[in-house]
Image: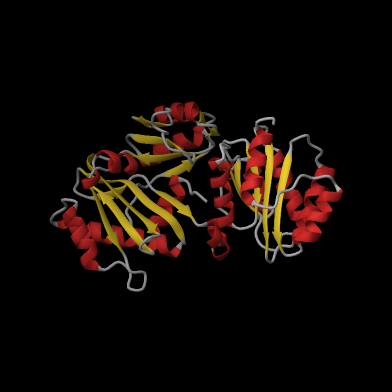
Amino acid sequence: MKLHEYQSKRIFAKYGVPIPEGEVATTPAEAREIAHQIGGSVVVKSQVLVGGRGKAGGVKVAKDADEAEQLAKQILGMDIKGLTVEKVLIDPTADIRDEIYIGVVIDRAQQKPVIIASAEGGVEIEIVAKENPDAIKRVAVDPVFGLMNFQATNLAYDLGLKGHYVGQFTKIIKGLYQAFMDTDASLAEINPLVVTGDEQLLAVDGKIVLDDNALYKHPDLAEMRDIQEESPSEREARLAGLNFIKLDGEIGCMVNGAGLAMATMDIVQHFGGSPANFLDIGGGANAEKVAKALRIILQDPNVKSILFNIFGGITRCDEVAKGILEALKQVPTDVPMVARLVGTNEEEGQKILAEANFPSATSLSDAAQQAVALAKGA
């Protein structure tokens, strides 16, 4: 789950990270009032959960409150990469002398949080990694001990900071790390952290991506969800307790287990197909849940065939088979399908499908080849 810039920066501020004293507006009149209270020039920033806001015209500088109102009128309602701007953040402009990138992510290989930093802030870190990898500094943090002072200090020096900036940076990076840990985030970043004309460090932009699996511990953060960031199918799947990600392919996949779902997508790709989604119905899925999952897959007009790959452990194959047939009663379709059911009650499940003349396969490779052939009209 992604948080908006203003939400992320407000969380950072609770951990001692200095941010501009801005406010959010939903109307041009509100934007004018906020700009008037700030005084002087302000930046009007669209709040949408996509990158490239500036290039799309969603970030503009206003010299006074009147111009802020006019710019807010232009930006509010704007479409940026398929998302409608419903809020703008009005921040005082900063006298930027230099820019730094800092972020915290999970390094799965090291099984630790890792701080990533670069003196080339204001640029997407992926671009820096590609064009100038030596500019990126990495610090692995032991989650038991947390970020140590010497690690933060050394990182400051590695970024070229000196004098009083080192103490400021240490406080900021420790605050960012603690915010990352306390919110169970998968990403927390400030880009850029700027050096201002009055020799202060200031987080003028921020981003937090939360781990959906930990949201049950953070109802206050869960309430911040912007449903506009989700497609209707992803929203429906979340409410139904399904792990679903829409992709651009043509073969719908319904699988139980994230690892098996990844393997299913890989083998579909191997045989020349392209998966239309990642969908994990989880363990113990019953007929009703399977029916909901199938309806979600069928909402995608690009789907030309559907592959069911169920390894029955907790999940019973006969329940899955019933779910498939029940969904087809509720949502009639001419999209061809093939099922591979193995494990608990597989004979019962296969019998249910056979009696309904539903195509099935005994191996995953056979099922994947059939699904690819069906998608191609064979």
Q: Position of residue 95 (x, y in %)?
A: 24, 39
Horizontal side, residue 329 vs residue 143: left or right: right
Position above or below: 74 against 36: above
Horizontal side, residue 44 vs residue 293: left or right: left
Residue in front for this viewpoint, 215 or 143: 143
Residue in front for this viewpoint, 221 or 95: 221
Q: Residue at x 66, y 34 (%)?
A: 375
Q: Residue at x 71, y 39 (%)?
A: 298
Most extreme residue toward the right is 355
Horizontal side, residue 272 vs residue 316: left or right: left
Q: Position of residue 24 (x, y in %)?
A: 47, 43
Q: Residue at x 29, y 40 (%)?
A: 130
Position above or below: 145 against 82: below
User: Is residue 122 among the parts visible in the rendering?
Assistant: no
Image quarter in which the C terminus is found: top right
Most extreme residue toward the left is 163
Horizontal side, residue 36 vs residue 1: left or right: left
